[in-house]
Image: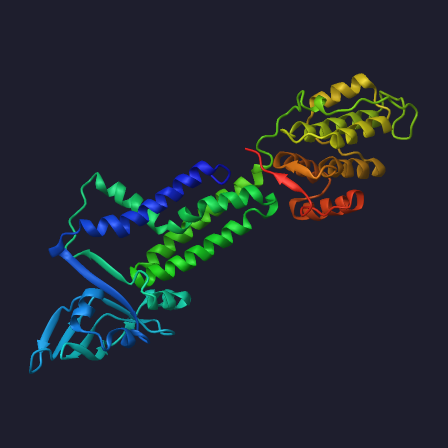
Amino acid sequence: MFRSYIPSLIGFVAGIGIIVYTFAIYPKSIEPDNIEYGCTFNAMTMENKLIGKTYTEITQKYLPPVSVKSKGRKGNMNARYENLRIFTKGENTISYGMNITYKDSVATDLVIDEPSKSKDAFFVNAMPLSYLLIDMEFMTRDRSPLNNSSAKGWQIPLLLLFGLLLINLPFLLLWPLTTYIVNKTEAPWANIFPLLLWLVGYWLYIGIVAYSNGSAILFVVLGVIWIIVADIILNGSVDQADLSHIHSTAGPRVLNTTTTYTPVSNNSGGGSNTSGPVYATCLSHISNLAAVLGTSKGHQSTERASVVASFAQKHGIDMNDFNTAIGKGTVDVTVPSNKTLYNEFRDNIARILLCDATMNNLQLGVAAKMLESYGIDRDSLSGFLDGISQKEYGRTFPGDYNIVMTS
């Protein structure tokens, strides 16, 4: 869901389709004699928008009155307007109607109805940009059917689906961007940025819904549920992304980059004792290192192969045993009890990953899984790799590395 761009692009197109239908297609389908007009105003600025305007200008730009009472000569009248949403900054109230006094068909005075408490006003005030958008007249005018016809049986599921997509429009529009972030961000942190992006997107969206539609509570409840579900899916995607394509064996790709060596006998690491427990542990470690090579997927390098070869030389590994171990490429980590070997094996896993400035997410995932056996969890992984990288190669992690995402 957050790795492939295909679902995200489909969702984005669906979001655009909902916008086009809601604002371009649906209003034209309403019968002219069955239209109810609505409008939103900021109580602090509405006088500037209305006073001095003619009756015709207000009718055409905003909405027609529900009733008009003439006062003396022609053009002098009092017009009643309803189906309004008038918000006052800092107050959780809404006024739903007003009266405008006209002289010579020009608005000279207006009186707003007594306000009433409203949860929608709370959400409008919680998103300060709401008043700026209202003053810009963004989505402040609407047309809806005066009398809605009942949906038929087969239409109900479609309406429910449309409503669900409309409520989660911010997610649909941000989906491709969040997928890109997940694919380009180091795995342990990949879930944070999309979540923040969603929260900001919904925050803006709910404020707009509150003043333009008046269904903020429904949007908040269902939106929160969807964010929680999406974040759970996102966390699962991030946690498994680097390990999802790990194979049990490294295969012949490892042999394409492995350099040969001449075994050194009788050295301190294990010497020529090819049957001892240290020797067997070293063979297991070679298989672990080979697993990192085996997930290279086009990002092989002689630097990484030399890490394996150097280790085999140091510990006097027989060539036949070496070839067998390198062909297994397993991620079954055997942690040595010897402190010296423990530190060497742990650091080798970091070295084979960091010796080349380019790696892919699979290699990073395999190495991360192995290092967990050495007490390096995902919270401390980045700091540990950065320490090894600066000490051994003079680079910072992840800043100086190109982490390529693979499908």
Side (left or right) of 237 relative to 400: left
**Which residue shows up at 42% across the image and 53% down it?**
224
Pick the residue in front: 192 or 261: 261
Residue most extreme to the top = 320
Quadrant of res 46: bottom left
**Residue 388 versus residue 90 in the image, above or below:** above
> Residue 170 at what x, y percent from top left?
40, 51
Report the label total: 0
Residue most extreme to the bottom = 72
Pick the residue in front: 230 or 13: 13
Quadrant of res 393: top right
> Residue 105 at what x, y percent from top left?
14, 76
Residue most extreme to the left = 73
**Which residue shows up at 81% across the image and 18% down it?**
319
> Residue 332 at what x, y percent from top left?
69, 29
Side (left or right) of 382 relative to 189: right
Residue most extreme to the right = 266
In the picture, the quarter occupied by the C terminus is top right
**Which residue shows up at 22% across the image and 65% down it?**
61
Answer yes or no: is residue 62 visible.
Answer: no
